[in-house]
């Protein structure tokens, strides 16, 4: 990321969630704030959704990864977890939709300072108030000490925490990913849901070229894809950073579970997966 600019890539999943509301009626992830926080009109959102074949697959993946994370999160809350940490939150609206507001839940949204400042502007413009359970924590994963920042913001190290880390891992170096996983696993009974990108060969043939172009465009805007993993590699990496119960959900399974809910889904396979890991 460029130091003083909000993440341009945060717009992509936000547009996909908004398009999912308009085109698929939010059937995988119902998000009444998705359009509002984005501040674009339906025409712009549809233009984005119809721009290229990756978009319908990306829309499926984005809605599904949030749904998988939020389902796991609600099970954790049922078991008594009261600390939720959304790492690299972008324009994620879970904190606004939090169904467990009546419980003593704290939601920590951690993001790059420039992206967080931009989100606050977006919220103010959309006249959306910050809920009382939300704590904003500005952090640069590559430079700052996440632990120090979260502890200073009030996170209790001796109580369980649920982390979501969606759309972020591919942009971080293995060093930064490893340090963050070490921190999460140092909290007793912690859990994390994140997604990762596989090597280019995991994309179906027609999409490989598009994926290559997207990677080149990202480099031009200073948001380099820094980490890709094979499923066996991520499992070993997670184990070496203190996680043992690992569920790794591939795109095929996501498409069979949720694909029917996406209008005009392009045939194809993205090399992306979602992991739910427990300590
Ligand atoms: C693709 S967006 C995903 C946003 C959100 N999780 C979602 O799914 O809509 C990537 C997010 O990672 C954050 N990010 C990327 N590099 C970061 C870094 N070095 N430190 C902190 N945040 C970073 C960006 O600010 C952005 O919010």
Image: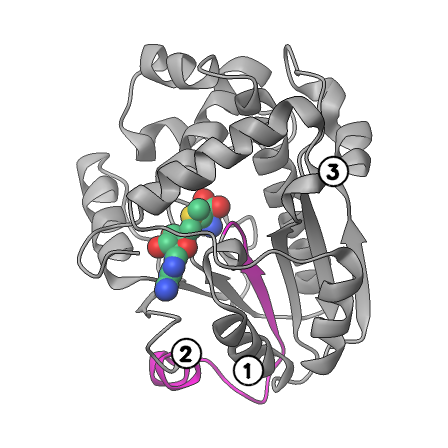
Query: Mark 3 falls on what kind of element?
Result: helix
Q: Report ligand 1 position as a quadrant.
A: bottom left
Mark closer to the chain start, 2 or 1: 2
Marks 2/1 in contact by CB < 8 Å: the verdict is yes
Q: Is residue 46 left or right of residue 158?
A: left
Q: Which residue is mark 3?
A: 251
Distance between the Cα atoms at labels 2 and 3?
30 Å
Q: Which residue is mark 2?
A: 146
Query: Mark 2 falls on what kind of element?
Result: helix
- Taking depth in this image into account, of 48 and 81 the one nearest to the observer is 48
Measured as percent of width and height from the top left, residue 155 is found at 45, 80
- The answer to whether residue 89 is seen in the rendering is no
Q: Is residue 265 left or right of residue 133?
A: right
What quarter of the picture does the C terminus occupy? bottom right
What quarter of the picture does the N terminus occupy? bottom left
As for residue 160 lying within the magenta part, the answer is: yes
Distance between the Cα atoms at labels 2 and 1?
8 Å
Q: Residue at x 78, y 54 (%)?
A: 248
């Amino acid at each position: 990321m460029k130091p003083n600019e909000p993440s341009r890539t945060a717009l992509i999943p936000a547009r996909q969630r908004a398009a999912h509301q308009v085109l698929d009626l939010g059937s995988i992830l119902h998000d009444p704030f998705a359009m509002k926080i984005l501040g674009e009109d339906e025409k712009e959102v549809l233009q984005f959704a119809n721009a290229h074949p990756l978009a319908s697959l990306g829309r499926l993946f984005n809605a599904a990864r949030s749904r998988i994370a939020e389902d796991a999160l609600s099970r954790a809350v049922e078991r008594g977890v009261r600390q939720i940490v959304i790492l690299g939150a972008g324009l994620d609206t879970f904190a606004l939709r939090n169904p467990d507001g009546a419980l003593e839940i704290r939601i920590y949204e951690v993001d790059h300072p420039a992206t967080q400042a931009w989100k606050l502007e977006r919220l103010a413009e959309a006249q959306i108030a910050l809920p009382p359970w939300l704590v904003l924590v500005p952090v640069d994963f590559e430079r700052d000490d996440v632990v120090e920042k979260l502890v200073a913001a009030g996170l209790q190290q001796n109580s369980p925490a649920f982390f979501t880390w969606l759309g972020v891992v591919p942009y971080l170096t293995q060093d930064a990913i490893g340090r963050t996983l070490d921190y999460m696993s140092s909290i007793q009974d912690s859990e994390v849901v994140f997604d990762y990108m596989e090597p280019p060969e995991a994309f179906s043939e027609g999409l490989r070229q598009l994926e290559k172009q997207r990677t080149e465009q990202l480099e031009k805007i200073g948001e380099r894809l820094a980490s890709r993993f094979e499923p066996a590699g991520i499992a070993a990496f997670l184990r070496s950073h203190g996680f043992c119960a690992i569920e790794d959900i591939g795109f095929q399974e996501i498409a069979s579970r949720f694909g029917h809910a996406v209008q005009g889904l392009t045939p194809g396979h993205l090399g992306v997966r979602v992991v739910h890991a427990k300590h």
